[in-house]
Image (tube, rainbow, N blue to C red):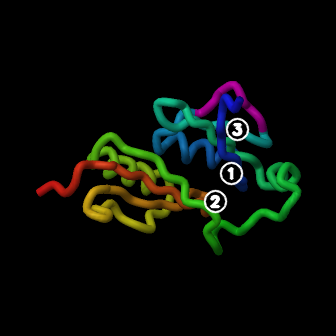
Amino acid sequence: MIKEFWLNLPVKDINKSKEFFTKIGFTPNENQPSDEMCGVYIGEKKMSIMLVKEETFQGFAQNPISDAKAGTEILISFDAASREEVDETASKVFDAGGTIFSEPAEVQGWMYGFAFIDLDGHRWNQLYLGSGTTS
């Protein structure tokens, strides 16, 4: 039986990536100090994301790393408790050096969210799954 699930993301600089994700509200896993990888948690259930130095990641995957800045392999999504939280996270991402490619806005009449690119080109979005439009 599977007990845990985590994502592994290749990054150029472990410390800069850890700092970026901490600034936007993720929690670092302090039990994994390493020059090769570190974990960060997101959400109440503490979903784990491993930030892995590109060379180490390529060794694990035994396949070349895709250029996340040239193409998109995955869009990682996470929720928000309110529209205001979406706006606050967008501000944090901008301040931490991320690139917002879709400003906070209503999506399909029942969601509110924004999308951004982290320091290594991975694409993320945060969504508030509200109950429709607000006036």
Predominant secondary structure, magenta span: loop
Q: Amino acid at mark 1?
A: Leu
Q: Which residue is mark 3?
A: 38
**Badge nearest the viewer, 1 or 2:** 1
Residue type at mark 3: give it. Cys
- Looking at the rendering, the stretch of residues picked out in magenta corresponds to 28-34
Relative to residue 45, is residue 107 drawn left or right?
left
Q: Quadrant of residue 40?
A: top right
- Determine if the magenta segment contains residue 77: no
Callout 1: SS = strand
Q: Earlier in the sequence, mark 1 or mark 2?
A: 1
For label 2, the SS is: loop
User: Which residue position holds label 1?
Assistant: 9
Q: Residue at x 43, y 57 (%)?
A: 94
How many numbered dots are placed on residues in this image? 3
Question: Looking at the picture, how far across and down is residue 113, in whole percent?
Answer: 35, 56
